[in-house]
Image (cartoon, rainbow, N blue to C red):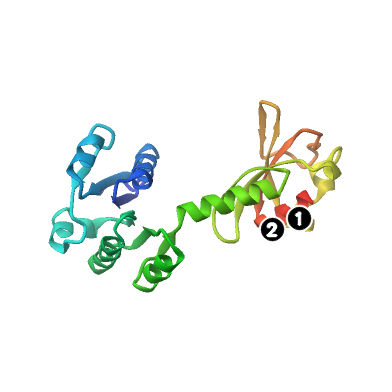
Amino acid sequence: MRGRQHKREFIVIGLGRFGTSVARTLVEQGHDVLAADVDYKRVQALASELPHVVQLDATNLDALREIGADSFDTGIVCISTDFEANLLATVLLRKLGVRRVIVKARTRTQCEILSRIGADEVILPEHEAGVRLARRLSAADFVDYLEVSPEISIIEMVAPSHLHGKTLVEADLRRKYGLTVIAIRRGEQLQVNPPADAVIEEGNELLVVGRLEDAERLSD
């Protein structure tokens, strides 16, 4: 599965709803993905959707070696219904030298344990979804946001009233709030990389990049 430099290679272990969604999306993005699950029926059900899907006990080091798990750039472990298997699969991927191991956890305690045994990144999907919803509801102007890193988010927000009638240069959001406007939505039209003299009007939505806290300050 190697050879094309524009692609990255992922092994996704555990094909519940979350793991399947990750695998499908990575395939849609053009990456090489090997999806694996211990459940044969689940593997069979996904065989027509995913190019490379295998039945695999990810707690077996020899089985992982046999499928070439050590050759993948990133391993994503999503065996959330069996924490012991989740833990062991993570340890084995690290032992095999997988460059980056991302693991799904169900609780903060699991998150801490997985981080300590070598996971490069641990995610709590339910927690993150809850935080995302709460922050979006708390900031009345927020339409949606995507956290790229702990310090950087892409936020879509309704332009607050104190910006109406101002150009981007007059609003000076970068200096005042540390935010960069990358697009303005006017109804059905999206103006990407708007010029400095673009006027912010009532009902416009701004797509900005920066810290979530700074976007919340702007919306106050």
Amino acid of disc 1: Arg
What secondary structure is marked by label 2? helix
- Nearer to us in this view, 116 or 126: 126
- Nearer to us in this view, 50 or 57: 57
Q: Position of residue 156 (x, y in %)?
A: 65, 42
Q: Residue at x 34, y 47 (%)?
A: 19
Report the residue marked by disc 2: 213
Report the residue marked by disc 1: 217
Cβ atoms under marks 1 and 2 closer than 8 Å = yes
User: Count of labels shown?
Assistant: 2
Amino acid of disc 2: Glu
Report how far apart the C-alphas of labels 1 and 2 lie in the structure: 6 Å
Q: Residue at x 33, y 48 (%)?
A: 5
Q: Position of residue 82 (x, y in %)?
A: 29, 58
The quarter of the displayed image where residue 70 is located: bottom left
Q: Is residue 135 above or below residue 150?
A: above
Q: Position of residue 87 (x, y in %)?
A: 30, 65
Crowdedness of circle 2 by 10 Å Cα count: few (<14), some, many (20+)? few
Q: Residue at x 81, y 34 (%)?
A: 201
What secondary structure is marked by label 1? helix
